[in-house]
Amino acid sequence: MFEKGVASLKNLRYDVKKMEGQALKSNRIKYVFIIIVLGLVVYAGYSIYGQNNKQENKPIEIPEEKIEMITNLRIPVISFDTINPILSKNQQIQDLARLIYEPLLELTTDGKIELCLAKEWTKQSPTSYVIKLRDNVKWQDGTLLSAKDVQFTFDRLKDTNINSIYAYNVEKVIGVEVIDDNTIKINLTQEVPFFEYQLTFPIMSYHYYENEDFINTSKNSKPIGTGRFQVENNDGNITLKQNKNWWKQEKEETKLEEIQIIKYQTMGEVYNAFKIGNIDVLTTNTLQLEDYIGTIGYNKKEYYGRNLDFLVFNCKNSILSDVEVRKAISYLINKQNIVEGIYKGKYIVTNFPLEYGSYLYDDKKVEHEYNHERARYILEQTGWTYYRKTWQRTKDYRTQRLRFDLVVNNSNENRIQVAENIKQTLSEFGIDITIRKVTEGQYQNYLQNKNYDMLLTGVYSGFSPDISYYFSGNNLANFQNDEMNQKLEEVKNIRDEKILKEKYKNIIEIYEQQMPYVFLYYSKTTLVCTPNLVGEINPNSYQVYQGIGSWYRQ
């Protein structure tokens, strides 16, 4: 029994161990399973985190907004006469013509001469120029530009029956010789300072007009040029299309495919058309723009016009011959006050004829600006005394007083107001001014004889840097200065821009020392466009549509 009990106990121990082994094995399996599950959870969590992290760091892709590019432009013209620029007297046509026709030379935005149809030019003598044309420039019908075209254009401009607005450009031209297909020689009757600036008129096609009546031919309804656009249609309104033969096509992209020139009878019609969205861009020099089209819903760019007004001192006058008196008066004229009060801020104050963006004029602070105290100081330092509300001095045993006549044309209401402004300012200071409002005939007589003390006048200022009109010869101010004359002679034949700029710096300094004039202000022109017109919109008085190659509507 005992042995059986022992054996049973052994068997029991074996069974217990067996059971313990099985339990341990089972636990191990559990642990392995748990570890595997935990591993899967961790892996899944890491994968999800990694995926989310990637999503967070990944740039957000916003669907690209497609901007519709509208490649046609609508431009108005009033009082249309002809699209032929040699015949047209319409300034708007002349501005548009620069898109169709091209000159021998053109101007940069800062007034430098730049080659266009000419590839080079040479001044052989004071009265002789040689021009070489570019090779392979084509007219819009595919024929080649030649020297014969240039000669033909000069002949048309010289034709008194045509009376072109460009006749002045060739006034001193006595003949144009064709040297070869690409070379011409221009001969002048006398030297013209900076004559190259006169060569900016459009060149016309000889073969297109050959055997035609240039003035009356039906071909004037659809003439050809060498420019960026060409006339596609002229039935009613005018349609311009891109010129695929344009020689600059590879260098200058043109986004606009079409320009519609829409004809109107009055500027009032143009303003109304703009307000209701029938045109995209217009130019105007009105002083009441906001009255016509409001103040919102459009963009505008303002730029210098070409009308320059100025005050003339007669330097032969016994008192105004004194430069210090002229300087003192110049300090008393409040140009900004005149521009803001009379011209509604639509004119631009200026101090010199070249101050319209020319590279020859440094944009610097000119000394002669409104300064009441400075004027008083100058007069007192030169022997003048303020006595009984007037300035006087004794010279050669005689008493002199600052009393002058100011002549103004009575047909120009704005200038009369300016004269009144100047009179009031000077009178309050103690300088007595009598305004003489004269008729057109009397005004011309004053200009011819220069028998005035002071004169308020204006000119249309061209693009040439030649300013001899103001300072040389029989000028309006009767101003004579040997140093100024020498400098003006020197600049005639200088082509180096750096040297030329230095010479003009000297000229400007002489002017500021002598003050024979007080240059007042330039007119201002405004280009108005719809807000959806984009591109490089940089108008100037030479090229209103500067940058048009980048324009489009959206």
Image (cartoon, grey):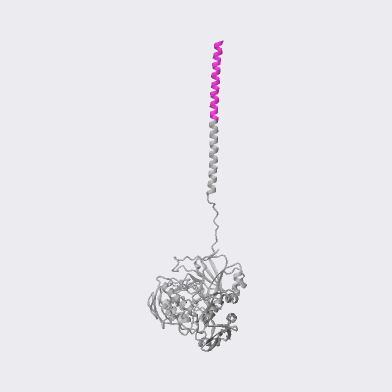
Relative vertical location of residue 175 with respect to residue 15 in this rendering, above or below: below
Give the camera-side residue of 14 and 133.
14
Measured as percent of width and height from the top left, residue 287 is found at: 59, 75
Question: Along the horizontal axis of the image, is 21 left or right of 497?
Answer: right
Give the camera-side residue of 345 and 159.
345
Measured as percent of width and height from the top left, residue 279 is found at: 57, 69
On the question of residue 339 being in view, the answer is: yes
Relative vertical location of residue 406 with respect to residue 526 in this rendering, above or below: below
Measured as percent of width and height from the top left, residue 216 is found at: 50, 80
| Residue at the spot 54% in from the left edge and 17% down from the top edge | 11
On the question of residue 80 being in view, the answer is: no
Give yes or no for residue 12 being in the magenta stretch: yes
Q: How many marks?
A: 0
What span is in magenta? 1-30
Give the camera-side residue of 253 and 35.
35
| Residue found at the far top of this picture | 1
Question: Along the horizontal axis of the image, is 172 left or right of 66?
Answer: left
Give yes or no for residue 97 being in the magenta stretch: no
Question: Along the horizontal axis of the image, is 189 left or right of 406?
Answer: left
Quarter placement of the N terminus: top right
Measured as percent of width and height from the top left, residue 126 is found at: 39, 80
Quarter placement of the C terminus: bottom right
Residue 333, by quadrant, is bottom right
